[in-house]
Amino acid sequence: MASDLELLLKLQVIDYDIGELERSKEYLPDMMENLNREMEESGKKLEETKNLLDETRVKQNELETDIGVKEAELQKYQQQMMSIKTNKEYDALVAEIDSIKETISQKETELLETIEKVGNLEKEVKELEAKSVEILDNNTKQLSILQEKVDSIGDTMSSKEKERQSVVINISKPIMSVYERVRRGKGGQAVVVVKKRACGACFKALTPHKVQEVKRADKIYTCDSCGAIIYWDEDVSN
Ligand SMILES: [Zn+2]
Protein backbone atom coordinates (compact mmCIF):
# COMPACT_ATOMS: atom_id res chain seq x y z
CA MET A 1 0.00 0.00 0.00
CA ALA A 2 2.89 2.33 0.69
CA SER A 3 3.74 1.97 -2.95
CA ASP A 4 0.24 3.11 -3.95
CA LEU A 5 0.84 6.25 -1.94
CA GLU A 6 4.24 6.74 -3.50
CA LEU A 7 2.69 6.38 -6.94
CA LEU A 8 -0.06 8.85 -6.07
CA LEU A 9 2.50 11.38 -4.86
CA LYS A 10 4.48 10.90 -8.04
CA LEU A 11 1.31 11.28 -10.07
CA GLN A 12 0.42 14.44 -8.22
CA VAL A 13 3.77 16.01 -9.16
CA ILE A 14 3.26 15.05 -12.80
CA ASP A 15 -0.28 16.44 -12.75
CA TYR A 16 1.00 19.65 -11.24
CA ASP A 17 3.55 19.95 -14.05
CA ILE A 18 0.88 19.25 -16.66
CA GLY A 19 -1.33 21.91 -15.06
CA GLU A 20 1.57 24.36 -15.16
CA LEU A 21 2.12 23.60 -18.84
CA GLU A 22 -1.57 24.23 -19.51
CA ARG A 23 -1.42 27.52 -17.65
CA SER A 24 1.78 28.49 -19.45
CA LYS A 25 -0.11 28.36 -22.74
CA GLU A 26 -2.01 31.37 -21.38
CA TYR A 27 0.59 33.27 -19.46
CA LEU A 28 3.60 32.88 -21.74
CA PRO A 29 1.95 34.79 -24.61
CA ASP A 30 0.79 37.39 -22.04
CA MET A 31 4.33 37.79 -20.75
CA MET A 32 5.63 38.11 -24.31
CA GLU A 33 3.01 40.70 -25.11
CA ASN A 34 4.03 42.71 -22.04
CA LEU A 35 7.70 42.59 -23.03
CA ASN A 36 6.87 43.72 -26.58
CA ARG A 37 4.63 46.49 -25.28
CA GLU A 38 7.35 47.70 -22.92
CA MET A 39 9.77 47.97 -25.86
CA GLU A 40 7.22 49.80 -28.00
CA GLU A 41 6.39 52.22 -25.21
CA SER A 42 10.01 53.04 -24.43
CA GLY A 43 10.67 53.61 -28.15
CA LYS A 44 7.60 55.82 -28.43
CA LYS A 45 8.53 57.84 -25.36
CA LEU A 46 12.04 58.36 -26.76
CA GLU A 47 10.62 59.44 -30.12
CA GLU A 48 8.21 61.91 -28.50
CA THR A 49 10.93 63.42 -26.34
CA LYS A 50 13.25 63.78 -29.34
CA ASN A 51 10.49 65.56 -31.27
CA LEU A 52 9.86 67.86 -28.34
CA LEU A 53 13.59 68.61 -28.18
CA ASP A 54 13.62 69.47 -31.90
CA GLU A 55 10.61 71.77 -31.49
CA THR A 56 12.20 73.47 -28.50
CA ARG A 57 15.46 74.03 -30.39
CA VAL A 58 13.49 75.60 -33.25
CA LYS A 59 11.79 77.85 -30.73
CA GLN A 60 15.17 78.82 -29.27
CA ASN A 61 16.41 79.81 -32.76
CA GLU A 62 13.27 81.83 -33.42
CA LEU A 63 13.63 83.70 -30.15
CA GLU A 64 17.31 84.44 -30.84
CA THR A 65 16.42 85.78 -34.30
CA ASP A 66 13.51 87.85 -32.90
CA ILE A 67 15.72 89.36 -30.22
CA GLY A 68 18.36 90.21 -32.86
CA VAL A 69 15.74 91.98 -34.99
CA LYS A 70 14.37 93.89 -31.99
CA GLU A 71 17.86 94.92 -30.89
CA ALA A 72 18.59 96.28 -34.37
CA GLU A 73 15.31 98.25 -34.21
CA LEU A 74 16.25 99.57 -30.81
CA GLN A 75 19.62 100.75 -32.11
CA LYS A 76 17.92 102.47 -35.01
CA TYR A 77 15.54 104.33 -32.67
CA GLN A 78 18.33 105.21 -30.29
CA GLN A 79 20.21 106.84 -33.19
CA GLN A 80 17.09 108.77 -34.16
CA MET A 81 17.20 110.24 -30.66
CA MET A 82 20.24 112.28 -31.80
CA SER A 83 18.25 114.12 -34.42
CA ILE A 84 15.05 114.80 -32.43
CA LYS A 85 13.49 118.26 -33.08
CA THR A 86 10.33 118.48 -30.95
CA ASN A 87 9.08 117.30 -27.57
CA LYS A 88 6.29 115.43 -29.29
CA GLU A 89 8.77 113.51 -31.42
CA TYR A 90 10.84 112.86 -28.34
CA ASP A 91 7.86 111.45 -26.37
CA ALA A 92 6.83 109.24 -29.24
CA LEU A 93 10.33 107.88 -29.67
CA VAL A 94 10.80 107.25 -25.94
CA ALA A 95 7.52 105.33 -25.89
CA GLU A 96 8.68 103.29 -28.87
CA ILE A 97 12.04 102.54 -27.25
CA ASP A 98 10.39 101.54 -23.96
CA SER A 99 8.04 99.25 -25.78
CA ILE A 100 10.88 97.54 -27.68
CA LYS A 101 12.95 97.19 -24.51
CA GLU A 102 9.95 95.58 -22.83
CA THR A 103 9.53 93.16 -25.74
CA ILE A 104 13.24 92.28 -25.72
CA SER A 105 13.13 91.69 -21.97
CA GLN A 106 10.13 89.37 -22.32
CA LYS A 107 11.75 87.43 -25.14
CA GLU A 108 15.01 87.14 -23.23
CA THR A 109 13.17 85.65 -20.28
CA GLU A 110 11.44 83.24 -22.63
CA LEU A 111 14.79 82.42 -24.26
CA LEU A 112 16.39 81.58 -20.91
CA GLU A 113 13.50 79.28 -20.08
CA THR A 114 13.75 77.67 -23.52
CA ILE A 115 17.50 77.13 -23.20
CA GLU A 116 16.93 75.48 -19.85
CA LYS A 117 14.21 73.30 -21.36
CA VAL A 118 16.54 72.28 -24.20
CA GLY A 119 19.17 71.28 -21.63
CA ASN A 120 16.68 69.22 -19.64
CA LEU A 121 15.31 67.55 -22.76
CA GLU A 122 18.82 66.70 -23.99
CA LYS A 123 19.48 65.03 -20.65
CA GLU A 124 16.14 63.24 -20.80
CA VAL A 125 16.77 61.99 -24.35
CA LYS A 126 20.15 60.60 -23.27
CA GLU A 127 18.57 58.78 -20.32
CA LEU A 128 15.71 57.46 -22.43
CA GLU A 129 18.14 56.26 -25.08
CA ALA A 130 20.15 54.34 -22.49
CA LYS A 131 16.99 52.93 -20.94
CA SER A 132 15.60 52.01 -24.33
CA VAL A 133 18.76 50.11 -25.26
CA GLU A 134 18.67 48.31 -21.92
CA ILE A 135 15.00 47.36 -22.34
CA LEU A 136 15.57 46.23 -25.91
CA ASP A 137 18.56 44.12 -24.90
CA ASN A 138 16.89 42.59 -21.85
CA ASN A 139 13.48 41.99 -23.40
CA THR A 140 14.88 40.49 -26.59
CA LYS A 141 16.77 37.94 -24.52
CA GLN A 142 13.70 37.16 -22.41
CA LEU A 143 11.51 36.91 -25.48
CA SER A 144 13.75 34.32 -27.07
CA ILE A 145 13.74 32.28 -23.85
CA LEU A 146 9.94 32.49 -23.66
CA GLN A 147 9.60 31.64 -27.34
CA GLU A 148 11.68 28.51 -26.76
CA LYS A 149 9.36 27.57 -23.91
CA VAL A 150 6.28 28.14 -26.06
CA ASP A 151 7.80 26.05 -28.84
CA SER A 152 8.58 23.20 -26.47
CA ILE A 153 5.19 23.05 -24.68
CA GLY A 154 3.91 20.39 -27.07
CA ASP A 155 6.91 18.10 -26.65
CA THR A 156 7.11 18.56 -22.88
CA MET A 157 3.39 17.91 -22.61
CA SER A 158 3.50 14.65 -24.51
CA SER A 159 6.48 13.40 -22.52
CA LYS A 160 4.63 14.30 -19.29
CA GLU A 161 1.54 12.48 -20.55
CA LYS A 162 3.63 9.39 -21.25
CA GLU A 163 5.20 9.60 -17.81
CA ARG A 164 1.72 9.92 -16.33
CA GLN A 165 0.51 6.85 -18.18
CA SER A 166 3.46 4.81 -16.91
CA VAL A 167 2.54 5.74 -13.33
CA VAL A 168 -1.23 5.38 -13.70
CA ILE A 169 -0.89 1.88 -15.12
CA ASN A 170 0.48 0.72 -11.75
CA ILE A 171 -2.27 2.27 -9.61
CA SER A 172 -5.42 0.25 -8.97
CA LYS A 173 -8.62 1.52 -10.58
CA PRO A 174 -10.54 2.25 -7.32
CA ILE A 175 -7.65 4.28 -5.93
CA MET A 176 -7.27 6.12 -9.20
CA SER A 177 -10.94 7.00 -9.17
CA VAL A 178 -10.64 8.38 -5.62
CA TYR A 179 -7.66 10.44 -6.73
CA GLU A 180 -9.42 11.77 -9.82
CA ARG A 181 -12.58 12.59 -7.89
CA VAL A 182 -10.71 14.45 -5.13
CA ARG A 183 -8.58 16.28 -7.65
CA ARG A 184 -11.59 17.44 -9.66
CA GLY A 185 -13.41 18.45 -6.49
CA LYS A 186 -10.50 20.29 -4.92
CA GLY A 187 -9.05 21.65 -8.12
CA GLY A 188 -5.54 21.09 -6.89
CA GLN A 189 -3.69 18.94 -4.40
CA ALA A 190 -5.48 15.66 -3.85
CA VAL A 191 -2.83 13.97 -1.72
CA VAL A 192 -1.76 15.86 1.41
CA VAL A 193 0.42 15.08 4.37
CA VAL A 194 -1.12 15.14 7.86
CA LYS A 195 0.26 18.12 9.78
CA LYS A 196 0.08 18.32 13.58
CA ARG A 197 -2.53 15.56 13.51
CA ALA A 198 -4.73 17.60 11.20
CA CYS A 199 -5.59 17.34 7.52
CA GLY A 200 -3.02 19.24 5.46
CA ALA A 201 -5.72 20.48 3.08
CA CYS A 202 -8.56 21.67 5.33
CA PHE A 203 -6.59 21.78 8.62
CA LYS A 204 -9.36 19.98 10.48
CA ALA A 205 -8.03 17.88 13.38
CA LEU A 206 -8.23 14.11 12.83
CA THR A 207 -9.79 11.84 15.43
CA PRO A 208 -7.29 9.66 17.37
CA HIS A 209 -8.82 6.69 15.63
CA LYS A 210 -8.25 8.22 12.21
CA VAL A 211 -4.69 9.09 13.16
CA GLN A 212 -4.08 5.43 14.04
CA GLU A 213 -5.50 4.32 10.71
CA VAL A 214 -3.51 6.80 8.67
CA LYS A 215 -0.35 5.86 10.56
CA ARG A 216 -0.98 2.20 9.83
CA ALA A 217 -1.11 3.05 6.10
CA ASP A 218 -2.59 -0.31 5.22
CA LYS A 219 -4.74 1.37 2.60
CA ILE A 220 -5.48 4.80 1.17
CA TYR A 221 -7.34 7.02 3.67
CA THR A 222 -9.24 10.22 3.01
CA CYS A 223 -10.10 13.19 5.23
CA ASP A 224 -13.66 12.95 6.59
CA SER A 225 -14.09 16.71 6.22
CA CYS A 226 -12.74 17.56 2.78
CA GLY A 227 -12.12 14.19 1.17
CA ALA A 228 -8.42 14.75 0.47
CA ILE A 229 -6.20 11.68 0.41
CA ILE A 230 -4.13 11.94 3.59
CA TYR A 231 -0.91 10.24 4.62
CA TRP A 232 1.38 10.16 7.62
CA ASP A 233 4.94 11.41 7.61
CA GLU A 234 6.82 10.97 10.90
CA ASP A 235 8.80 14.16 10.37
CA VAL A 236 5.83 16.51 10.05
CA SER A 237 2.64 14.73 11.10
CA ASN A 238 3.02 14.49 14.88
ZN1 LIG B 1 -9.40 17.71 5.02
Image (spheres, rainbow, N blue to C red):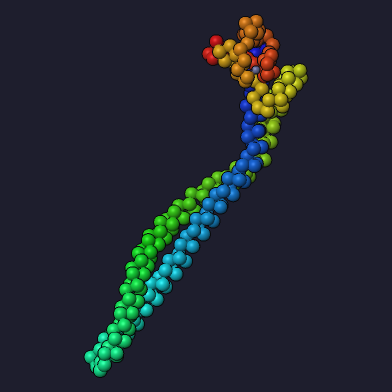
Residue situated furthest front in the rendering? 87
- Vertical comparison of 22 with 188: above or below: below
Viewport quadrant of the N terminus: top right
- Residue 15 or residue 162, whichever sits in front: 15
Q: Position of residue 223 (x, y in %)?
A: 67, 15
- Residue 229 or residue 155, whichever sits in front: 229
Viewport quadrant of the C terminus: top right
- Residue 19 or residue 159, whichever sits in front: 19
Q: Quadrant of residue 232?
A: top right
Q: Which residue: 64% across, 42% down?
A: 26
Q: Which residue: 48% across, 52% down?
A: 135
Q: Quadrant of residue 6?
A: top right
Quadrant of the rendered image holding ligand 1: top right
Q: Position of residue 11 (x, y in %)?
A: 66, 25
- Vertical comparison of 17 with 210: above or below: below
Q: Which residue: 40% across, 70% down?
A: 57
- Direction from residue 150 to residue 69 in the image, left or right: left
- Vertical comparison of 127 with 73: above or below: above
Q: Position of residue 19 (x, y in %)?
A: 65, 33
Number of callouts: 0
Q: Position of residue 224 (x, y in %)?
A: 69, 14
Q: Which residue: 60% across, 17% down?
A: 203
Q: Quadrant of residue 9?
A: top right
- Direction from residue 184 to residue 60 in the image, left or right: left
Question: Can residue 149 be spotted in the picture?
Answer: yes
Question: Can residue 212 be spotted in the picture?
Answer: no
